Amino acid sequence: MPKVTFITPDGSPNEVEAGPGSLMEAAVAHNIEGIDADCGGVCSCGTCHVHLDPAWLDRVGPAGPHERDLLDFNDAADASSRLSCQIELNDALDGLVVRVGRRP
Amino acid sequence: MQAPEDPFKSAREKDGLLRCKYQGESIPMVLRHHDIRRITKDHATFSSDAPFRVPIPSEENVRTVRQLPIETDPPDHTDHRRIIEPVFRRPRESEMQARIPAIIATLLDAALSQDSIETVANFALPLQSRALACLLAVPEAEAEEWIGWGIHVFRVGAGEKKGAALDRYLRRRLDRAAADPGDDFFSLLTRATFQGRPLTRDEQIGFGNLVFAGGRDTVIHSVTGILAHFAEQPASLDALRGDEKAIATAGEEFLRVLSPLTHLGRVCPQGAEVLGETVPPDGRIGLCWSSANRDADVFEAPDEVRLDRRPNPHIAFGSGPHACIGAAHARLLIRDLIRQLGERVARLRLLAAEPLLESRPEYTRRIGYESLRLVFEPLR
Ligand code: HEM
Ligand code: FES
């Protein structure tokens, strides 16, 4: 399974071994600070916000319409923002680096 | 399984609006998911800065203070909301994640040991009240007084000041907190400052009022709606037993289909055009969360309860800056309820149900139960 790195709000990188599932689930499994994931990954709460490292933006792809809707409410969201529950991990994403974003 | 009937379907699909009359005031209800989301972003045009007028019907006759933080707009709203944020973050911490299950376990012990139980008054209400005591960091025994108020305490009756009892309670409780402060919610309010000054007593009451009024019926209706569903669809509980992720996903679908809060209002200080309808200056519109959650543009087969629905971008908790601050608490409670039902209950059997209807000339909607008598059959 892929290794992914979360840069937490204090700036420290946390590399974790992800299991199957979404990027949000990897964060929750490792208690990554700043990922509340209140709705459990159904794209309803917006509390799993991350910024993708520019190098990864193209490979992961853009937010879908409902995800975009939620991100639009977050003043801290920008073009690099995604909701981590909407990113399914696979081996092609090994080495992914994301910065934990602010909650809405 | 079909969700409860959606009274807004035809108006939503046709115009996106339903014109409703409340106490002589004509209020267009906005019905589509996309429109509601858009409106909650534009608080300059669609404002919450209107004491008593965010709820529909309005509550001039129910209470004497502005509810906070709900009846303000950013930027003040941001500072108001920040005051109580620490309390509402507690459900994400392990202490509360242990205490809520203990409350539910005790109630399940009682339910399983009786032949049958009326779950609105004797399960959902005590659960809601004890869980609230836990959230507000006051001794659980204080919840007994709140339970004693019964299930009708905040229901709006025409022209009655039903909120007077709550008002008196809050004044008394805040006096006590000021005299003998602790780490609880009321003490926090007595210490809190807003933009550099202490909160007035009316502001403190405004925060307290909303926590009691906003978090009571919504939670009670969620709990009984879930119990009733499992009683009608026993196999759906079997499918969730022991599966944490499936339980969380199911909880969101229950919130979508139950949508315990039908709608809330916004005031248009300068007037507005909404979907071809002219709202006069100081007129109101309604944001119909329960309709948005059945919008076929967003949800496939919106009238079906699909407990494994993902994604599920429902707005049962609202949307935008005012999105429910109690959501993490409500979710903790709902998920743990489903988890423990799965661990301990073989079957729920329905003995008698009296639905609670929100009945208006323009629509009728089941929002919960007046009473719901069930048998809890133990597992093994
Ligand atoms: C399933 C249960 C619940 C539902 C469906 C629900 C629904 C909502 C909705 C739709 C809003 C948005 C208001 C707006 O946009 O004007 C809201 C706000 C709010 N809710 Fe809840 N709620 C629930 C539980 C709770 C609980 C348990 C509490 C407190 C203990 C609570 C306290 C609040 C407060 C204080 C606000 C105002 C937030 C703000 O203005 O920033 N709610 N709720
Ligand atoms: S976990 Fe709720 S939107 Fe991602």
Image (tube, coloured by chain):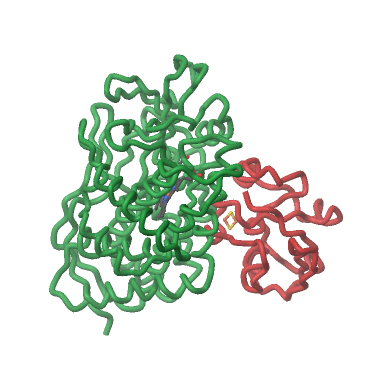
Question: Does the rendering let one see residue B225?
Answer: yes
| Figure quadrant of the C terminus of chain B | bottom left
Residue B308, position as x, y percentages in the image: 46, 60
User: Which residue extends farthest bottom?
Assistant: B380
Residue B162, position as x, y percentages in the image: 23, 41
Residue B76 image-quadrant placement: top right
Does B221 appear above or below B101?
Answer: above
Side of B306 where B159 appears, left or right: left
Question: Does the rendering let one see residue B300?
Answer: no
Name the one closer to the observer, B13 or B210.
B210
| Figure quadrant of the N terminus of chain B | bottom left
Name the one closer to the observer, B159 or B348.
B159
Name the one closer to the observer, B231 or B111.
B111
Residue B251, position as x, y percentages in the image: 43, 60
Residue at 32% across / 33% down in the picture?
B59
Residue at 49% across / 73% down in the picture?
B95
Residue at 33% across / 49% down in the picture?
B171
User: Which residue extends farthest front?
Assistant: B179
Does B75 appear above or below A93?
Answer: above
Q: Quadrant of ligand 2?
A: bottom right
Name the one closer to the observer, B292 or A51.
A51
Does B338 appear above or below B257?
Answer: below
Side of B181 where A75 appears, left or right: right
User: Which residue extends farthest right?
Assistant: A55
Does B323 appear above or below B59?
Answer: below
Q: Colour of chain B?
A: green
The red chain is A
Residue at 62% across / 59% down in the picture?
A85
How many numbered circles does the render carry?
A: 0
Residue B174, position as x, y percentages in the image: 38, 53
